[in-house]
Amino acid sequence: MRNLKLPSLLLAALLGASALHAQDEPEPAGRYRKYEPTARSFSCEIPSRGWHAFEEDSVQGYAVHILGPDSPTGTYRAGIDIHWVERGQSGYMDYKKAIDVQRRSDAAAERKASPVRLMRVAGMNARVFEVTETRLLPPDRLPAAPEVLHHYVAILPSGDSYFLIRLSSTRDSYLDHRDEFVRFLKHFRVLGYK
């Protein structure tokens, strides 16, 4: 009987310590949290757990990247990219040409695209489609193996400028993220620009 008391006390101490640790880290209020970049160009909701956003300025313009979970193989991380493409920027092309470029087939990469369809996003007509392609992953080390990537793409015109929004993941996990992307688009709001 004496031997059972020590393990029981240790277990109770560990459970108490983990409960205190859990209190140190506040639980997110909900499954999603609001995100708004510093440029205040849009707002959206992203999953509270496992998705992290960062911003960058590039030659092509302003972009937000929201990184999600790794693929089952660990070679590719799911993510949503939001690019604001403004008329007058370096490399600008109108949204119709951008759709053609994004959907362009490529035999070497086994790149294929679905037809374009309309979807209401932020009170405007977005053009949405899917693209699959094969890449060698990981790209920066060996051994690399061909892996099929899946992209959900939405182009949201706003005058002569537009948002290019893309969810990318591996083909093995794209169905896990499809509903997240549709929800993301439904909660996407265009605000204004600095």
Image: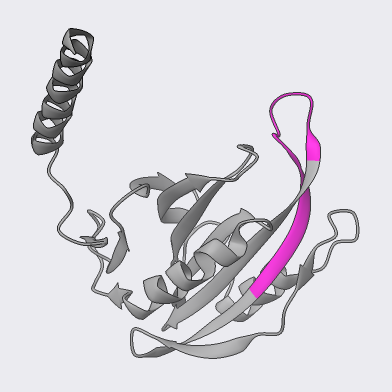
Left-right relation of 145 to 183: right
Residue 32, horizontal then vertical, whole percent: 26, 62
Q: Residue at left 15%, top 36%?
A: 22
Which picture quadrant has residue 112?
bottom right
Nearer to us in this view, 105 or 76: 76
Residue 38, horizontal then vertical, whole percent: 22, 53
Q: How many marks?
A: 0
Question: Up-down: is 128 above or below 98?
Answer: below
Q: Is residue 97 visible?
A: yes
Q: Residue at left 19%, top 13%?
A: 1
Question: Up-down: is 188 above or below 22?
Answer: below
Q: Is residue 92 visible?
A: no
Q: Which residues are magenta?
A: 130-145
Q: Residue at left 71%, top 75%?
A: 100
- Residue 37 is a magenta residue: no
- Residue 133 is a magenta residue: yes
- Render colour scheme: one colour
Residue 21, horizontal then vertical, whole percent: 14, 29
Nearer to us in this view, 9 or 189: 9
Q: Which residue lies most toward the front here?
A: 1
Location of the C terminus (image quadrant):
bottom left
Q: Residue at left 80%, top 37%?
A: 145
Which picture quadrant has residue 34?
bottom left
Left-right relation of 159 to 73: left
Question: Up-down: is 62 above or below 13?
Answer: below
Nearer to us in this view, 35 or 164: 35
Residue 181, horizontal then vertical, whole percent: 46, 69
